[in-house]
Amino acid sequence: MSKVMQLMEEKFMPIAGRIGSQRHLVAVRDGFVAIMPLIIVGSLAILINNFPSEAFQNFMLSLFGEQWKTVGGNVWNGSFAILGLLVAASISYRLARSYDLDGLSAALISVASLVILTPVTKDWGISYAWTGAQGLFVAVLTALVVTELFRILIKSKLTINMPEGVPDGVVKSFKALLPATIILILVGLLQALLTVLGNTSLHEVVFNSIQKPLQALSDSLPTAIIFAFLNHLLWFFGLHGTNILGPIMDSIYLPLIEKNQSLFSAGTSAFDVPYIVTKPFFDSYVFMGGSGTTLSLILAIFIVVKSAHYRSVAKLSAPAGLFNINEPVLFGLPIVLNPMMLIPFILIPTVLTISSYFAISLGFVPKTVAILPWTTPPFISGYLVSGGSWSGVILQIINFTIATVLYLPFIKAADRTQMKQQNDAA
């Protein structure tokens, strides 16, 4: 075990650390985080509009009339329906700021470029089909490429410099004028070329050749297990697995939950929407209490542990753990770089991923149809993400029990070692 640990520390951790701090991946991660409040609000609006309770639906109908769902629909239009535009602006802004450039100018140019690349409807309106999650890959790609072009043009001094005394906002605006002109002309030429050669758009090319096959692959059990395994392996070595994998998981899994939500809002049952593995799938059924399902570990400590250190850490960590904040356990117990906790910390999320996948695929539990704040406590989250089904809560209880039972022998062995060290010290 020591040789394996040494090998991982020498070879794996430096690579993972560089990936986690890579400028473009950080910009993508921070860009998704910045728009998360809008995503959550849009998700809750859909959930309220389609809450599976006849009494609730009749109450809202009698109180507000037949148009009561219009508000929720408008909220969805301002969040999920324009997800690609929001992501393009947010990522571009973050990346430009990492270069100490004008983030607002870069974001505006990126959004303008994305609009050029987006197909229009017959009456020349922007198509919602491509401004939402379905156009997410092109939005991310556009933000990164346009911002890099903006940086190159700014550094090449292809700018209009204003004299001293001119307001700062005007200076920035004119400085971005030539770069914006060049970028928009290039993007316009690209779209014209795609139209002439194939009567298509970049959105359609990317969706059919990359995004669609990748989404089909990501909804599989093996892919879900790989993500769960890598997330916890990174955390074990003290690296923020959720942040490192976040750009990849958000790009892949947000379109899936958006598709589930749109069908659910149209009246499709949560059992009949297409995708099993989504971001809420992991957050609600696998990461209860945070990565490693550490809320179950806290319960296991209260059941069998005698060590004052472990019990103190559990008492201090329990309130935060209820809201899926588990850094006190990860670094206080510790789990990070603790060989005795490596097996359960990685094994348990893998087991819960498998149990949750089969429970949903066999029709015992509805698929996920809502995105919630990651701090939503377990059991509440299971009810909401499943579209208001108690079977989601039952799955969480079963998974929580499995995780607690699996943690028991390992934490008991660790407790014996801790008690022996205390006795020796005494």
Image (cartoon, rainbow, N blue to C red):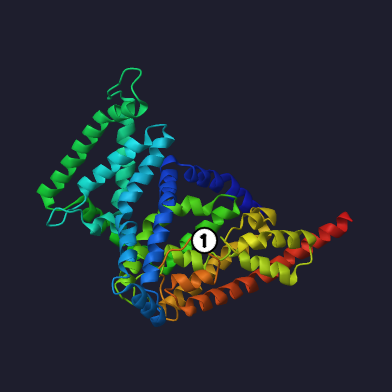
Q: Secondary structure at mark 1?
A: helix
Q: Quadrant of residue 53?
A: bottom left
Q: Position of residue 30 (x, y in %)?
A: 44, 47
Query: Which residue is depicted at the point 31% across and 76% down?
Result: 268
Q: Is residue 247 left or right of residue 396?
A: left
Query: Which residue is depicted at the point 25% across and 46% down?
Result: 114
State the residue lying farthest toward the front. 63
The amino acid at mark 1 is Phe
Q: Which quarter of the figure is the N terminus placed in?
A: bottom right
Residue beneath disc 1:
229
In the image, residue 422 above or below residue 116: below
Q: Is residue 128 left or right of residue 369?
A: left
In the image, residue 3 above or below residue 18: below
State the residue lying farthest toward the left. 196
Q: Which quarter of the figure is the C terminus placed in?
A: bottom right
**In the rendered image, is residue 342 in sight?**
no
Q: Position of residue 125 (x, y in %)?
A: 17, 54
Query: Which residue is depicted at the point 38% across and 82% down?
Result: 54
Q: Position of residue 282 (x, y in %)?
A: 48, 65
Query: Which residue is depicted at the point 30% across and 35% down?
Result: 149
In the image, residue 105 above or below residue 263: above
